[in-house]
Amino acid sequence: MASQRKFFVGGNWKMNGNKQSIDEIVKFLKAGPLSENTEVVVSPPSLYLEYVQQSLGGSVGVAAQNCYKVPKGAFTGEISPAMIKDVGCQWVILGHSERRNVFEESDELIGQKVAHALSEGLKVIACIGEKLEEREAGKTEEVIFKQMLAIVPNVKDWSQVVIAYEPVWAIGTGKTASPEQAQEVHQSLRAWIAKNVAPDVAAAVRILYGGSVNGGNCKDLGSKPDIDGFLVGGASLKPEFVQIVNARS
Ligand code: PEP
């Protein structure tokens, strides 16, 4: 039976862009055409969330790249899920490898953020992934299952969550996991979810692949049965993002 999971493509712009370059991205997103069979969400720097939300006019979802674990208060530099919702956005990316590895966010903090974001009504793109030395030591599953264990107790409604498997060695490096390597991890992750959460959640939850996805490799990756879409960094700033959105069409 073909998967009932709607293909999902997220564009993580990271700390890139200004109003002028954002206008260009909005232009190619509006021109598309973007497949109706794909849910599309872009994630600008927080300063531009409202600008992007208004420019896109609801045709594409908008995600913050991060948020804090409480609604408000003395947390200089942070933004809350309530604020993200207040400017009209619906999604937040949590646990991105750059948050984990550059800003040293722990599994525990990411779990707390997931709980708070969901309780405030935001949908979450929850990221997990192993480093190169962990893969080479045969620890990929151990690492990602441990990251999952910090997320799972904080989710009540899995329809509000997508998981992004992003091997750290493939992010921004031009080194993509092969479709077979990615499928192998996605399949074992889905089996882990069936065992540790519930079989119906495992069947329904979307597991995205992230790591140097581009217009050239997206069709092969997207043809794998457990790859339900992508989280895209570099290529989400370029017109080829439209091709990635349409990878399954
Ligand atoms: C990312 O930042 O989530 C990512 C996958 O980046 P890139 O596509 O540039 O590897």
Image: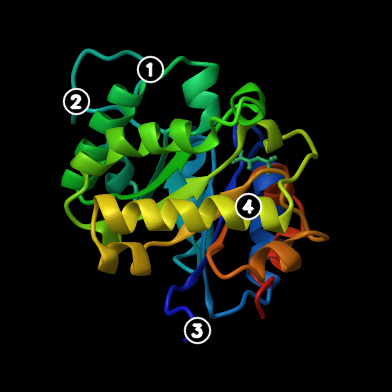
Is residue 221 rendered to the left or right of residue 72?
right
Which of 56/123 is in front? 123
Which of 21/105 is in front? 105
Is residue 216 rendered to the left or right of residue 199?
right
In which quadrant will I find the C terminus? bottom right
Residue at image position (20%, 37%) is: 116
* Circle count: 4
Q: Pointer 1: what residue? A: 77
> What is the spatial separation of the Cα atoms under label 4 and label 2, in whole angstroms?
38 Å
Q: Pointer 4: what residue? A: 182
- Closer to viewer: mark 2 or mark 3: 3
> What is the spatial separation of the Cα atoms under label 1 and label 3, in whole angstroms?
45 Å
Does the CB distance between marks 2 and 1 fall below 8 Å?
no
Q: Pointer 3: what residue? A: 2
Q: Is residue 1 above or below residue 46?
A: below
Three-letter amino acid code at disc 1?
Gly
Label number found at residue 72? 2
Does the CB distance between marks 1 and 3 fall below 8 Å?
no
Q: Position of residue 14 (x, y in %)?
A: 59, 35
Q: Is residue 78 above or below residue 48?
A: above
- Closer to viewer: mark 4 or mark 1: 4
Does any portion of residue 65 appear in the rendered image? no
> What is the spatial separation of the Cα atoms under label 2 and label 3, in whole angstroms?
44 Å
